[in-house]
Image (cartoon, helix red, strand yellow):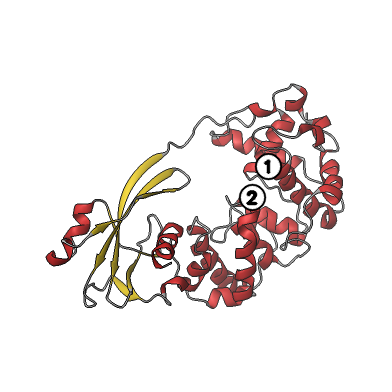
Amino acid sequence: MLPAGFAGRVVRWQRTHGRNTLPWQNTRDPYRVWLSEIMLQQTQVAAVLGYYERFLARFPDVQSLAAAPLDDVLALWSGLGYYSRARNLHRCAQDVVAVHGGAFPRTAEVLATLPGIGLSTAAAISSFCFGERAAILDGNVKRVLTRVLAFGDDLSLGANERRLWDHARALLPARELQENMPRYTQGLMDIGATVCLPRNPSCLICPVQPQCAATQAGRPEDYPVKTRKLKRSAESLWLLHARADDGSVWLQKRPTPGVWAGLYCLPVFGSREALEEVLPRPVRRTLRDVEPFLHVLTHKDLHLHPVQALVPAGWGGAEGAWFGEREWPALGLPAPVRRFLQKVDS
């Protein structure tokens, strides 16, 4: 039995208590909404704010983004992580221009066919911009709905997640969609991000608390249920910090797919021995190991071991290039590599 009046509660709360002043709100421009939705995937609002403003300053519309070189997009994205989002962002902009005449599709069904736009993101764009009656189901919203419904089926199974999608669609507003769908969609996001937290949820101030079956049972933290968890792994990598006499640094573009795909990076090796093999013998005797450091990815810990070498300016090959101290900061670099180079040059 679905709770009656659920959508109305969410809409009313969002109007007075939800987040209404973020820079991508109070607009129905699908380009701006799409850009924010992609940036906010697995990333906190505070981390996105600066990147969002810089992207709009450099790429004010989908046409300018589509026409830009991918390297420029990756450079502006550098540090935000999950770089496949930036590559898909660029491909999506190109498809919108080439296939859809520069206008974003108006339905979630068609939006979901574009690169990097899944079902939930497509629904967010179509509901925010066009008032479409389409359900979102990102991680925060799954938590809200499974608690309200006491939906205890294992979401690691596709059939159970499809059932939750059905419930999410059934709970959508039915009237005044142009006004209510954007507020309802934003309201679910706001409740999940600020009230219905994974640990110690603020149930007493939650607008849907009277309808929340999990809270009534005193067990909100039992939901959602997902038994299949990705195991964390660890990997050690050696980074060659090769410098020329003029201070230039040797960088290579990372292959796709793989970690940091498409970004410029210090040469990466699986062992120190492999790193030494690419260097002239006289240079090997001058290598200096820098204190290793840890970089944490979503499901992997990277133990990074920088090794410094002063090499002749003619060293290198077709797979990389020398970049001066005024050039490399403008490149798309992995965040740990950028921080390392900034620290070395400071």
Find residue 92 and report its horizontal and vertical position in percent: 55, 66
Figure quadrant of residue 200:
top right
The answer to which of 338 and 119 lies nearer the viewer is 338
Q: Residues within 10 Å of mark 1 (few under 14, many from 20)?
A: many
Please tell me whether residue 243 is drawn above or below residue 115 in the rendered image: below
Position of residue 334 in the picture relative to residue 47 (left or right)? left
Instruction: Pick whichever, 163 or 335, lies toward us.
Output: 335
Tag nearer the camera, 1 or 2: 1
Q: Amino acid at mark 2?
A: Ser
Q: Position of residue 15 (x, y in %)?
A: 85, 51
Which residue matches tag 2? 120
Query: Could you say which is closer to the camera, residue 339 or residue 188?
Result: 339
Considering only vertical position in the picture, is 175 above or below 247? above
Q: Quadrant location of residue 242?
A: bottom left
C-alpha distance separating marks 1 and 2: 10 Å
Q: Residue 171, percent across and down?
A: 77, 40
Q: Secondary structure at mark 1?
A: helix
State which quadrant residue 125 falls in. bottom right
Task: Check contact, mark 1 vs mark 2: CB within 8 A.
Answer: yes
Amino acid bearing label 1: Val
Question: Which label sits on residue 141?
Answer: 1
- Horizontal side, residue 278 vs residue 54: left or right: left
Extreme-top residue of the structure = 217
* On screen, residue 203 above or below 125: above
Residue sitting at 68 percent across and 33 percent down?
A: 146
Circle on res. 50: none
* Quadrant (top left, top right, bottom left, bottom right) of the N terminus: top right
Task: Tell me if residue 174 can be seen.
Answer: no
The earlier-in-sequence mark between 1 and 2 is 2
